[in-house]
Amino acid sequence: MSSYMQQVGVKLFKQHLDNYAPPDPLYEYYTDAKGKQRRKKRDVPPGISPRDAKILKTVQRRARRLDKSFNICGLRFGWTFIIGIIPGAGDVACAALNYILVVRKAEQADLPPWLIGKMVFNNAVSAIGGVVPVLGDIVIAVYKANSRNAMLLEEFLRIRGEEYLKLQAEGDEVRSGRTAASTSGVSQKDMEQVKPGAGMESGRSFSSFLSQRGKKQTAGPPADGDQGRFVENMSA
């Protein structure tokens, strides 16, 4: 009976932790027609450059190794938890790995400073929590800073891809003469932060779209506020 109660306790504990943990950075789960849970790799957001797609896949893969490599009794943890067990040096090593392997790689996707700041903040929460003996290691295992940062990158690139596809469709319609240039009200500040088409060959990046817009239309009224309307308030 005690063994059964222990299994129930572990299951309930896992469910409780899952409420606070971010999703798997590399896989998404679904239920098939037979009611069995399956997993598949997360789709690359459409409209992003091959460079950004490669960076995203690398970050997702590294985040999973650092946060969710192992599974014991249904509880997932990664190398950061194991390394963090080492007093002092383990916490420093985890903070360094989180930044070098995930944040620094994500920076190669031309991210705005405020988004990099969110990623560094997530790492800081994990590092500060790791200072507390034993409990700190549990905080690291639950908080999963690298998985959170991978999700931030994926969401940002999803928005970048959406805006690129919109601009591409708008440009095709203008060139074909089917419609006049749009005045969608997207501010230049938004465009400069999201950078649609970043990483693509010359002539398809956000800067070329901005120059074409400036020649063909008078810009519509900018979005309200100084930050723009896309992802500055995206939760970490």
Image (tube, helix red, strand yellow):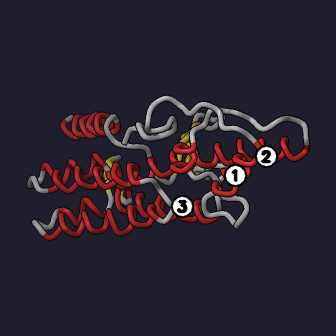
Residue with the mark numbered 3: 57
Q: Amino acid at mark 1?
A: Phe
Decide if residue 76 is in sight here.
no
Cβ–Cβ under 8 Å for marks 2 and 1: yes
Graded by Cα atoms within 10 Å as few (under 14), some (14 to 19) or many (20 or more), the crowding at tag 3 reads some
Q: Is 10 left or right of 132, judged from the image as shown?
A: right
Q: Earlier in the sequence, mark 3 or mark 2?
A: 3
Depth-wise, is mark 1 or mark 3 nearer the camera? 1
Residue with the mark numbered 1: 209
Depth-wise, is mark 3 or mark 2 nearer the camera? 2
Position of residue 206 relative to residue 32, above or below, is below
Q: Amino acid at mark 2?
A: Gly
Please count the marks in the image. 3
Given residues 114 and 82, the one toward you in this image is 114
Position of residue 86 relative to residue 213, above or below, is below
Name the residue located 27 percent from the left edge and 68 percent from the top edge. Answer: 96
Decide if residue 133 is in sight here.
yes
Q: Amino acid at mark 3?
A: Lys
Q: Position of residue 5 (x, y in %)?
A: 22, 34
Residue with the mark numbered 2: 171
Name the residue located 43 percent from the left edge and 44 percent from the top edge. Answer: 23
Q: CA distance from mark 2 to mark 1?
A: 8 Å
Q: Earlier in the sequence, mark 1 or mark 3?
A: 3
Q: Secondary structure at mark 2?
A: helix
